[in-house]
Amino acid sequence: QVQLVESGGRLVQAGGSLRLSCAASGRTFSSYTIGWFRQAPGKEREFVAAIRWSGGITYGGDSVKGRFTISRDNVKKTVDLQMNSLEPEDTAVYYCAAGTLGVLDNADERARYDFWGQGTQVTVSS
């Protein structure tokens, strides 16, 4: 069992940066792949990035590549999402999720994740 709590979301101006954090509880945290997803109003939940216990990383679409960076600390049981050059289109509720994915090829599939946090709101003003 893993419990996840996101933090760091807030209102920020376009061009600014935010660092989201996902704090996990549970003894087996290090064996889970952790993913970040986001959901804007009226839209589907969208894959942002994922990181395996070993450090393997994959990112979502071109809209986040080069601007977002995911990292994890297995000792602190946290996974961070550094977001730079934020755009109004990045406005969404950001969720972290944990799953026992064997490979990252299907990291964008929500059904692969067993545990989800409650989300943190990121609002980017123009």
Image: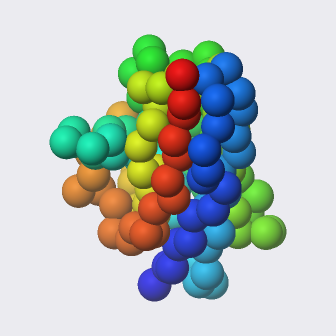
Q: Residue at x 46, y 84 (%)?
A: 1
Image location (x, y in percent) of residue 94: 46, 50
Q: How many marks?
A: 0
10 sits left or right of 39 in the view: right
User: Which residue is situated farthest in the front direction here?
Assistant: 126
* Pick the front one: 79 or 39: 39
The quadrant the C terminus occupies is top right
Image location (x, y in percent) of residue 89: 42, 25
Compared to 92, does 101 lie above or below? below
28 sits left or right of 111 in the view: right
Q: Residue at x 71, y 32 (%)?
A: 17
71 sits left or right of 57 in the view: right
Identify the image's colour scheme: rainbow, by chain, secondary structure or one colour.
rainbow
User: Which residue is situated farthest in the right direction here?
Assistant: 75
Instruction: Tell me where residue 31 sits by quadrant.
Output: bottom right
Image location (x, y in percent) of residue 81: 64, 44
Would you say residue 56 is visible in this rendering? no
Image location (x, y in percent) of residue 24: 61, 73
Compared to 71, does 118 lie above or below? below
Would you say residue 57 is visible in this rendering? yes
Q: Residue at x 60, y 52 (%)?
A: 9
